[in-house]
Amino acid sequence: MDLRVYIAGKITGEDPVKCMQKFEAAEAKLRRLGVQTIINPKKLGIPDSWTWKESEEICKKVLRENANAIYLLNDWI
């Protein structure tokens, strides 16, 4: 089975630059482990100004339709 991994972690209220770095580091780690399809929510085009609720609707849709595994960052709750 081809893994399609969604990275889950805290985005709302985070510094945009540090947040992107955190998600890119996770993406790089997954690539080193051989995962080819990685869904980075920071790269979905969601504006930083959106609320958690607005963002979550899109993220859940992408997760449901495109991923079959989730990589949880330490701050995902």
Image (cartoon, grey):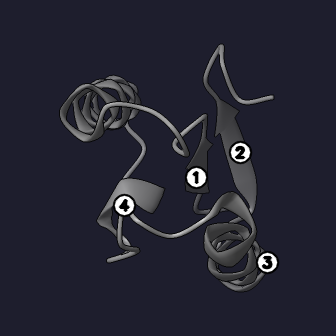
Q: Which comes sooner in the sequence, label 2 or label 4?
A: 4
* In the depicted structure, whether residue 66 falls above or below residue 11: below
Residue 42 x, y percent position in the rendering = 37, 56
**21 left or right, relative to 47:** left
Q: Which comes sooner in the sequence, label 4 or label 1?
A: 1
Q: Give the Cα distance between marks 3 and 2.
A: 11 Å
Q: Which residue is mark 2?
A: 70
Q: Which residue is mark 1?
A: 5
**The C terminus sits in image quarter:** top right
What's the mark number on residue 64? 3
Q: Which comes sooner in the sequence, label 3 or label 1?
A: 1
Mark 1 is surrounded, within 10 Å at the Cα level, by few (under 14), some (14 to 19) or many (20 or more) other residues, namely many
Residue 21: name its quadrant: top left
Q: Secondary structure at mark 3?
A: helix
Q: Which comes sooner in the sequence, label 3 or label 4?
A: 4
**The N terminus sits in image quarter:** bottom right
Q: Which residue is mark 4?
A: 48
Residue 19 x, y percent position in the rendering = 34, 33
Comparing 12 with 57, the one in front is 12
Q: Which comes sooner in the sequence, label 2 or label 1?
A: 1
Q: Give the Cα distance between marks 3 and 1.
A: 11 Å
Which amino acid does the dot numbered 4 rest on?
A: Asp
Nearer the observer: mark 4 or 1; the answer is 4
Comparing 25 with 11, the one in front is 11
Q: Secondary structure at mark 2?
A: strand
Q: Give the Cα distance between marks 2 and 1.
A: 5 Å
Residue drawn at x 66%, y 77% is 54
Residue 67: name its quadrant: bottom right
